Amino acid sequence: MITTTTAKLTFAEIGADEGLKKAIAMDRPTLIGQVSESGLKGRGGAGFPTGVKWNLCAAARSTSKFVVCNADEGEPGTFKDRVILTDYPDLVFEGMTISAHAIGAKKGLMYLRGEYTYLREQLEAVLTRRRKNNLLGEKICGKKDFNFDIEIRMGCGAYVCGEETALIESLEGHRGEPRNRPPFPVDTGFNGCPTVVNNVETLAWVSCIMAKGADWFKQHGTEKSTGLKLFSVSGDCDRPGVYELPLGITVADLMKEVGGENAKAVQIGGASGRCVPANEFDRQIAYEDISTGGSVIVFGPGRDMLDVARNFLEFMVEESCGQCTPCRYGNPKLLEGVEMLQDGRCSAAYLRELVALGDSIQLSSKCGLGQSSANAFLSIVEHFKDEIMGRAIA
Ligand SMILES: Cc1cc2nc3c(=O)[nH]c(=O)nc-3n(C[C@H](O)[C@H](O)[C@H](O)COP(=O)(O)O)c2cc1C
């Protein structure tokens, strides 16, 4: 069973719309300067600096701009955005409103994961309350010319639609396929207009940073990975759940926290992340070492790592949008290879070819899905050579 530890989250300490009121009193450069100063990087996985993104969008010339909240949360093993949307939705909408003030947007869109349809009604109720309290709509908090509102649109269960350009395609009513980048959404996003796309957690932290200050945020984490982060922990540990911890924490310390000390390996970053073996548990979870959107899956001593690789590859084969050849054809080939290994039909030489294929998929795929689809397989083969090679025939 998944338990959450939300009572301990910083989000519980933040006064209602404290951050928004402070942000509205600032001019745009000061506001974006505060976000940049905090060192906040995107919590959706890619870790792009939020202040830089907002600055680029603020500088883009257009009469129409958009703020999009990425609430697609499709990465296997991730459920922290669900907790934030359930317990602290105001902080997310507040963060979107702060972003709108920073870039000059009049409209915000939340792209909500299809499986979270059950949350929609309560989120709409929060939006209605915010409109009544003049926190959305015309002249927000009495500020002349600050008009902004938020609409919720539903995703439909495609992992690739979490990728920001596929998400925008889907928001526009098209098939959810990634676009070529550049141009980036900050220049050419929703309906061709400059758009900021931020993760649920990123936006909630923006509200906290505005309320408590950039220096408070920087006290946590490392120099390159400032602040606190939510981790969704599942798998073979005593206390699975959602944890708020500083970035820079080692895998070993995280395992102590969750009761997973005897783990054989930990998958950090979900199906698109990497498998970290026990002899590397002194590594840090941080953008400069092992970066993650927050998915942590613990594998106990009894786990068959080839089964783990197969499971992640099955997911990638299912979720590839099929637009580019390396991802469309490469992942089924890797999966077939793992099945051959399991059946005792794969030679060591063919396994080496599969590793080379994995490298090619990473290099030549069009979007982040394909570029990271072989990560789990490659890291498992690298770190569990004996276990995997032992299955290959001569
Ligand atoms: C296949 C794929 C799936 C993704 N899924 C999500 C997701 O569910 N939620 C999310 O916030 N970012 C997801 N991302 C990352 C987004 O493309 C984007 O970087 C993020 O929304 C930017 O917000 P941030 O800077 O606040 O992290 C995904 C990326 C890829 C390649």
Image: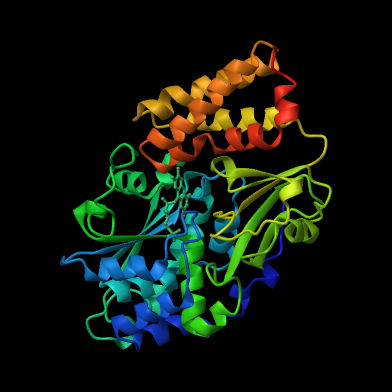
Quadrant of the rendered structure where residue 249 is?
bottom right
Quadrant of the rendered structure where residue 271 is?
top right
Task: Please say if 110 is above or below 389.
Answer: below
Q: Is residue 380 visible?
A: yes
Task: Please say if 18 is above or below 98.
Answer: below
What colour scheme does the image use? rainbow
Could you say which is closer to the camera, residue 201 or residue 271? 271
Locate residue 95, reporting x and y percent. Answer: 43, 71
Q: What residue lies at 71% left-to-right and 56% top-to-bottom?
A: 251
Could you say which is closer to the camera, residue 322 or residue 352? 352
Q: Is residue 224 left or right of residue 182?
A: right
Q: In this view, does 270 lie to the left or right of 252?
A: left
Task: Please say if 148 is above or below 258.
Answer: below
Task: Please say if 361 is above or below 202.
Answer: above
Locate residue 309, reporting x and y percent. Answer: 63, 31
Locate residue 31, reporting x and y percent. Answer: 36, 81
Could you say which is closer to the camera, residue 13 or residue 243? 243
How many marks do you count on the picture? 0
Q: Can residue 17 be seen in this view?
A: no
Quarter of the C terminus within the rendering = top right
Quadrant of the rendered structure where residue 106 is?
bottom left
